[in-house]
Image (cartoon, rainbow, N blue to C red):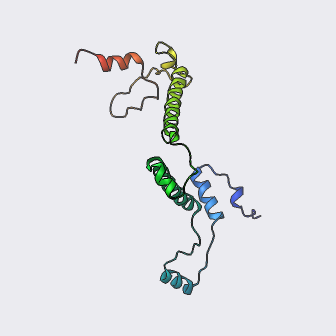
């Protein structure tokens, strides 16, 4: 009796590498291309993709808009009012806002940074707390008997005790 052929989904896979290889084999696509189209695409210089990437377009439009807005702001802030009136520009904000708006923005950024640092200091335990040295992921060193000779096993993973760190850093008997 012959057993039925196994499909890739019926295999028991032990390794992530095997899983990825089975998935890539299952989703493999074959593209048949016309040699005449390849020569036309290579001679015209296009890669076959049409249109621009939306993120590139948004970046370009954003950069151009920023430059134009900066130029308009600087012209409004530094051009005397009689020059603007002679050009026919009579409806614009008061010159007070040329200094007030950037000042408000800078103060808001500074206050956000102070608030952020304050929240971090409030969330941090005090230096005298044991939570600065131990947490739920801490591992105490296990007793380990080292073997003699060349075949020494690797010590189990554990945290280094604060007393050992202090001894290494601040020992005066060097």
Q: Residue furthest left?
A: 174
Q: Is residue 138 visible?
A: no
Q: Nearer the viewer, residue 173 or 46?
A: 46
Q: Position of residue 159 (x, y in %)?
A: 45, 24
Question: Does residue 92 lie above or below 33 as drawn?
Answer: above
Question: Looking at the rendering, which quadrant does residue 55 occupy?
Answer: bottom right
Question: Does residue 79 lie above or below 170 as drawn?
Answer: below
Q: Nearer the viewer, residue 128 or 172?
A: 128
Q: Residue at x 53, y 85 (%)?
A: 40
Q: Position of residue 59 (x, y in %)?
A: 53, 57
Q: Residue at x 62, y 54 (%)?
A: 19
Question: Does residue 169 lie above or below 109 as drawn?
Answer: above
Q: Nearer the viewer, residue 129 or 71?
A: 71
Question: Does residue 166 lie above or below 78 as drawn?
Answer: above
Q: Residue at x 56, y 75 (%)?
A: 48
Q: Residue furthest top?
A: 128
Q: Residue furthest bottom?
A: 36
Q: Nearer the viewer, residue 117 or 135?
A: 117
Q: Is residue 49 visible?
A: yes
In which quadrant of the rendered image does the N terminus lie? Answer: bottom right
In which quadrant of the rendered image does the C terminus lie? Answer: top left
Q: Residue at x 30, y 17 (%)?
A: 170
């Amino acid at each position: 009796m012959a057993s039925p052929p196994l499909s890739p989904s019926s295999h028991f896979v032990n390794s992530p590498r095997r899983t990825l290889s089975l998935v890539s084999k299952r989703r493999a696509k074959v593209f048949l291309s016309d040699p005449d189209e390849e020569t036309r695409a290579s001679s015209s210089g296009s890669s076959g993709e049409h249109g621009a990437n939306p993120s590139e377009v948004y970046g370009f439009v954003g950069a151009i808009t920023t430059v134009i807005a900066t130029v308009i702001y600087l012209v409004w802030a530094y051009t005397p009012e009689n020059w603007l009136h002679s050009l026919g520009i009579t409806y614009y904000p008061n010159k007070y806002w040329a200094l007030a708006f950037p000042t408000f923005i800078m103060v808001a950024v500074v206050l956000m940074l102070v608030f952020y640092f304050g929240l971090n200091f409030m969330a941090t335990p005090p230096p005298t707390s044991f939570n600065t040295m131990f947490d739920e992921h801490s591992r105490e060193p296990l007793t380990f008997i080292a073997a003699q000779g060349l075949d020494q096993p690797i010590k189990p993973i554990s945290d280094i005790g604060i007393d050992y760190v202090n001894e290494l850093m601040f020992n005066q008997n060097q």
